Amino acid sequence: MIRRIALQAGFALAAVACCAAAAPPAATAAAAEAKVAPAAQVPSVEDFFRKPSYGRPELSPDAKSLAVIAPVGDHLGVGVIDLDSKKVMTMKAPADADAIRVAWINDKRLVITIGDLNRATGDPPTARGYVVVDRDGSDQRILGGYNAPTVNLTASGGFKRPWSVSLVRPIEGTSDVLVTALDRDVKSLDLYRYDTETGRAKLLSFESPGYVTRWVADFDNVPRAAVSEDVDDDKAAWYVRKSAGSPWIRMEEAHVGDLKSGPMQFDASGKILYVWARKNGDDRASIYEYTVDTGAWKEVVSHPVRDIDEDTAFFIDDYADRKVLGLYYTDDRPTVAWFDPEYARVQKSVDAALPGMVNYLHRRKDRWIVTSFSDRNPGEAYMLDGKTMKMEKLFSYEPQIDPKAMAPIKWVRYQARDGLTIPALLTVPNSAGGKPVPLVVDIHGGPNVEANEWGYNPEAQFFASRGYAVLQPQFRGTEGFGWKLESSGFRHWGDTMQDDLADGVKWAVAQGIADPARVCFYGASYGGYASAWGSIANADLIKCAVVYVGVTSIDLLFDYAKTDLSRFAEKDQLMVERIGDPKTERARFKSVNPVDHADRVGVPLLLAYGASDRRVPLIHGTTFRDALDKYHKPYEWVVYANEGHGFTKDKDAFDFYGRVERFLAKYLGGISTSGKPEGATAH
């Protein structure tokens, strides 16, 4: 149950002026260099990997209260601050979960997204459900969401499948929210207006143009655009209509996963639909205005290197104001393109007051909330008085982190052996002094997911604090840098995708950044696969590999009934297109499965798995471990009993990263704050 408890930490306010105007089985020689440092000299493992203290502040519509994610016991709950009196009350999320997002429905009612913080793998927090509640903790109701039946509150609204309910947006000025749910058809989402006080749900999407996976409603909450997917027939399409009673117009049809455009957001008039599209064979996606009545197209935002696509977020302070103010998109630094001149003016002033930071704005009446972060700073929140243009600092997201002690992170580009340009994030420790240092290649999961963003990264800063340079390659298959880079990774697990990692190591060595004798691969999920395969295919380049919830057999992704992927693998053309066809490509799978080539492992491994992982079940680890035993290969092994695809419990995260710290110190010679390095065990 959501309940009120006393807040343990206060919110300190400080005035800030804002401008009013516009390897071998045994340890190598590197192990002898491993340093055991006093904990006071560098931030601890716990400093980097504990859950943030605060986050995601949201102003109430009347601008009198601030809702914020805040620590409540061992989890994150919600704090509500009266901005005039500075009085605070907190609410604990139900079902031993974390609050990961909060939004106001009206001045007294909130909707809270609950789930598990999954920072360890770099994935976004996992939503598990939605709770609606008054600001004083009363009149609570489970809206639904993933695993909602496990929450100890009754799901309301009469939805047949409460686990499928997903929040679209609050309808401010009412007690209602827009939600989608698989209610009339298990294959197709419907759009509902849901009263959070009465639990009544009103169907809005009477006519569905196929099996809908996403709805776009206009400012009048009328569903006017939709994306559909039929995985059985491998068909995807998107549609738009001029009004509620008009026929659907099909805008594009393609194979599942191959749409080159899609609907995003209507303007206030409802006459213009913002669309992301790769038009005329463009490699990169841009944002267009599509005039629904005339069919005219106009490009409004584009980028010479990056995609600006469906993940771009439009900024709308209040749907009641009927105004699209701007949009957030990803550049080498996250960027805002303002359509509204007042927001552009305030943005310029805030950026001048907080130089070097990415600063996001959110306004209610004459109060603004500024959230600010950088590569060295996990985040801070400020309150800006729109009349006086004075800012007060509210809190730091992670006050234990000293930004001055963190290392800068920057974008670099290097050439793969076939000439393809590979973007990468590079972090060089402050202690490097221009000399080569040991290198950790941090390999993202997915693999076909959005590229890493510039900003504070706890893993990169953790490694850098221990004396390692960190390279995060956005290897082929990664989204966000054009279709050529993304599609060139399809069906290339273990070959050209892996070559991109090796070529990154060679580039870092050639640039004088990395010591060629001290390189380690590190990765989770697909990154764990690439790390495990690197211990075989790249053993001449690396001295060790960390395999974190890593895939060790592509076959198991399709075959093993306990993985969540196996439920739709035979029908999901995306898996076939991007990984391979299990009916015809088994030989290729086996040629790049780490478990099938354990005899060739050439460096020590650290293997870490969650016993409850449904994406990469424990069998990936145990079968690989057994194969390593057969050939007497050195490895360290740890399983966390109550963890899944990423270690979310503090004690487990601290233990895991302590093991990583000692493992890297043994084979690369960096700093260890938690004791002398442990030896890998040969079985």
Image (tube, rainbow, N blue to C red):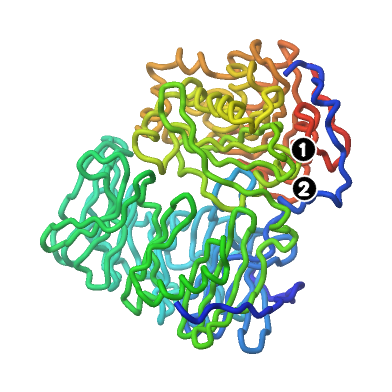
- Please state, as top left, top right, bottom left or bottom right, where the N terminus lies in the image: bottom right
| Three-letter code for the amino acid on which mark 1 is drawn | Glu
Judge whether residue 564 can be spotted in this image: no
Q: Residue furthest left?
A: 294
Instruction: Give the residue at mark 2.
Output: 45
User: Could you tell me which residue is drawn at 47 percent across and 80 percent down?
Assistant: 21
User: Could you tell me which residue is drawn at 15 percent across and 54 percent down?
Assistant: 249
572, 598: nearer the viewer = 598
Q: Is residue 400 left or right of residue 620?
A: right
Rendering coords of residue 89 (x, y %): 67, 79
Rendering coords of residue 354 (x, y %): 57, 68
Identify the element where label 1 is drawn: helix
The answer to whether the residue labelled 2 contacts the one labelled 1, judged by CB atoms less than 8 Å apart, is: yes
Judge whether residue 671 can be spotted in this image: yes
Instruction: Give the residue at mark 1.
Output: 661
Rendering coords of residue 512 (x, y %): 63, 30
Label 2, residues with CA under 10 Å away: few <14, some 14-19, many ≥20: many
